[in-house]
């Protein structure tokens, strides 16, 4: 975490693994399996957040699927998240139509709720989803599961432009972004670049003694790319 | 009770639409297309024609006299969905949704399958309508349902083995959803049970409602009265909701769903969601879910691949909470014994899934009065399960003299 922050990350997503991650590709699926096999729970991820907070003020977004959160209890989780210093939530499979109870529990603690928009979202839905968002809006760059790809989807620019009509919030674009050039391309239209699978893959494949340096370098490259894109 | 789901797909608190945003607009489109098709007489006429002349509807209602007499209670009637083309009720829904997909202009169909019956029905419907078909199936299920894997391929479908998780139905649905998320613009997801995000539980129920509607009519003609009870097995719950729906308004008819009791009461050894689970969200719907205390979905076990799933269809959760339907479970050994009994007494070899409903009828019949009627949905035939029967009934598979019956 410290390595990411040194590399220039502005926000960190902390994941709680779920047994059936339907929106994730192979890299995050394998990471979820490893994390579950190691006994990771909502409680343990909260404890990780608390430890990060001891020496960092970087904003933390807890991201997972709905069921572990529902099981833990919305109010209980929002309260505990506030205590340990988590700033917001992102639940992959929670549609805004079903989100009223969750959003009110989280907002009651003054924390943010981030929802996703996708290239398939109609204007009506962009407006609706934006109303449920605080902090930032997560723009999914393409139809598909998480994972790196060669090129940034051509659907990003029109989607971001459509969404700007409905919100003043910062827009972060994710799914499939892995290198500085892609970050630059996204940076030219959006306010933030979200990178997940590329880091998780690095964690999976890098020898432990080189991991922190690798993470820091990746973060720095991506940040410079994004800033270059903004011009 | 009959006025469900609401416009958001909720059956009481259950059901709904819990999916990634990328699927929300496509689900809206699907819902609109379905409502338009439902109101379109030419769509209904084409479906009715296929159900009659291709699939073999209406299916007979059979009075199992020898079995009823032996058990000494009421009359047991079997709704013969096992006689349908492809061997189970699944073809009702596969034909309906495949016609809908064609109407929506989708040329590529994906589906999940557990026992393989939905996969075979989908492959069949796609062959009939000239649609491209890919079926996701857990590798464990491919192993135990070899025959159905071959049937799907013979009909031109591509069968993709899923190696994640428990390698059963749950993992096949997850993989189908990943495909759909990726190819949603060109692809129709032909979901095979009364599960998933709205409008699937509604749509699948509607395509199977003919089961109960026919049986109700047939019983009124034959007996001049309604059944005392209607019994069906419940995995996701499509054959059960199809049977139950015509009787929900008839307060005198007991509705009994039979879940897979597996090999024991321990989590991981069964698929009894009501006795072992708690409400949760999986694959787009909120319903009773087998899960651990951290909200991770539990593994399940059943001798029948089609009942081996962690979540029960949301309308069943609603009927359960209202007390309108009762849900019990039946273990592997009891289901197997019921299959043997039905084969010997009536010459009907049931699918392993349907054997769970048969077992419940055998258990209850002696406690009923002679003028009671037990209506049982024989949702599928046992051809696909011959390997499982052979494995478990080794004495029948040797050529040494058999004990006289």
Image (cartoon, grey):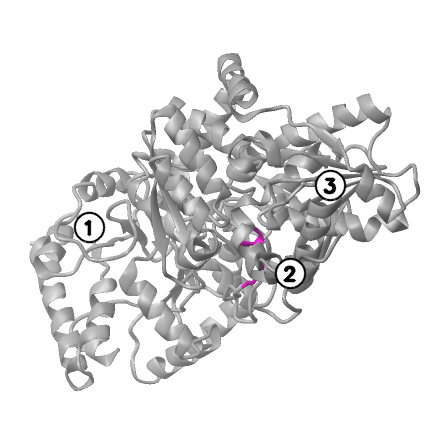
- Classified by dominant secondary structure, the portion drawn in magenta counts as loop
Q: Residue at x 67, y 62 (%)?
A: B333
Q: Distance between the residues labelled 1 and 3?
A: 69 Å
Q: Which of marks 1 and 2 is in front?
A: 2
Q: Which disc number belongs to residue B286? A: none
Can you identify the residue that label 3 sits on?
B346
Q: In which quadrant of the rendered view does residue B167 lie?
A: bottom left
- Decide if residue B236 is in sight here: yes
Q: A60 left or right of B166?
A: left
The chain holding disc 1 is A
Question: Is disc 2 surrounded by few (<14), some (14 to 19) or many (20+) residues within 10 Å?
Answer: many
The secondary element bearing badge 3 is classed as helix
Is the residue under label 2 in contact with that under label 1 (CB below 8 Å)? no
Residue A53 drawn above or below residue B361: below
State the residue in front, A129 or B287: B287
Q: Position of residue A219 (x, y in %)?
A: 16, 70
Q: Residue at x 58, y 36 (%)?
A: B89
Can you identify the residue that label 1 sits on?
A190
Q: In which quadrant of the rendered view does residue B1 lie?
A: top right
Q: Give the range drawn in magenta.
A: B300-308
The chain holding disc 3 is B
Residue A187 drawn above or below residue B64: below
The secondary element bearing badge 1 is classed as loop
Can you identify the residue that label 2 sits on?
B332
Choose the circle earlier in sequence order: 2 or 3.
2
């Amino acid at each position: 975490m410290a390595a990411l922050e040194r590399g220039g990350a502005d926000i960190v997503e902390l994941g709680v693994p779920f047994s059936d991650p339907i929106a994730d590709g192979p890299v995050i699926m394998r990471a979820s399996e490893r994390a579950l096999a190691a006994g990771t729970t909502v409680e343990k991820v909260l404890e990780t957040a608390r430890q990060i907070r001891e020496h960092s003020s970087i904003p933390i977004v807890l991201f997972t699927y709905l069921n572990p959160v529902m099981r833990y209890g919305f109010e209980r989780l929002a309260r505990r998240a506030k205590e340990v210093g988590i700033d917001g939530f992102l639940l992959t499979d929670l549609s805004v139509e079903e989100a009223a109870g969750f959003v009110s529990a989280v907002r009651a603690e003054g924390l943010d709720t981030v929802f996703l928009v996708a290239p398939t979202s109609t204007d009506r839905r962009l407006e609706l989803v934006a109303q449920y968002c605080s902090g930032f809006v997560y723009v999914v760059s393409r139809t598909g599961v998480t994972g790196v790809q060669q090129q940034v989807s051509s659907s990003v620019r029109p989607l971001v432009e459509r969404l700007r009509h409905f919100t003043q919030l910062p827009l972060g674009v994710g799914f499939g972004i892995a290198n500085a050039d892609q970050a630059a391309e996204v940076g030219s239209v959006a306010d933030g670049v979200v990178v997940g699978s590329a880091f998780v893959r690095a964690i999976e494949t890098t020898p432990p003694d080189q991991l922190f340096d690798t993470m820091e370098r990746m973060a720095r490259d991506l940040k410079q790319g994004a800033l270059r894109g903004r011009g | 009770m009959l006025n469900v789901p609401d416009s958001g797909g909720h059956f009481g608190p259950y059901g709904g639409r819990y999916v990634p945003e990328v699927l929300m607009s496509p689900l809206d489109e699907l819902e609109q297309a379905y409502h338009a098709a439902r109101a379109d007489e030419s769509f209904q006429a084409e479906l009715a024609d296929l159900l009659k002349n291709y699939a073999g509807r209406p299916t007979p209602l059979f009075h199992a006299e020898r079995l009823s007499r032996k058990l000494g209670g009421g009359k047991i009637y079997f709704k013969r969905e096992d006689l349908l083309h492809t061997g189970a009720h699944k073809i009702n829904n596969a034909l309906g949704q495949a016609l809908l997909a064609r109407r929506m202009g989708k040329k590529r169909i994906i589906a999940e399958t557990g026992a393989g019956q939905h996969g075979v029905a989908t492959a069949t419907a796609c062959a009939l309508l000239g649609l491209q078909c890919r079926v996701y199936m857990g590798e464990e299920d491919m192993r135990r349902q070899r025959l159905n894997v071959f049937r799907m391929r013979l009909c031109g479908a591509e069968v993709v083995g899923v190696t994640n998780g428990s390698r059963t139905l749950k993992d096949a649905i997850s993989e189908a959803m990943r495909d759909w998320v990726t190819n949603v613009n060109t692809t129709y997801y032909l979901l095979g049970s009364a599960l998933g995000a709205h409008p699937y539980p509604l749509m699948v129920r509607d395509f199977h409602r003919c089961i109960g509607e026919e049986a109700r009519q047939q019983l009124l003609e034959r007996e001049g009265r309604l059944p005392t009870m209607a019994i069906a097995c419940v995995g996701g719950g499509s054959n059960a909701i199809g049977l139950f729906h015509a009787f929900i308004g008839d307060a005198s008819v007991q509705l009994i769903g039979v879940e897979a009791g597996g090999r024991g009461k321990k989590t991981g050894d069964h698929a009894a969601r009501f006795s072992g689970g708690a409400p949760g969200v999986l694959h787009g719907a909120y319903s009773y879910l087998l899960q651990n205390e951290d909200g991770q979905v539990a593994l399940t076990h059943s001798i029948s691949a089609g009942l081996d799933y962690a979540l029960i269809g949301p309308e069943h959760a609603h009927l359960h909470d209202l007390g309108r339907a009762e849900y019990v479970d039946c273990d592997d050994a009891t289901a197997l014994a019921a299959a043997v009994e039905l084969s010997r007494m009536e010459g009907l070899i049931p699918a392993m899934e349907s054997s769970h409903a048969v077992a419940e009828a055998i258990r209850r019949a002696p406690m009923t009065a002679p003028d009671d009627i037990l209506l049982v949905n024989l949702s599928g035939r046992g051809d696909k399960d011959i390997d499982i029967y052979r494995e478990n009934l080794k004495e029948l598979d040797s050529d040494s003299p058999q004990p006289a019956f």
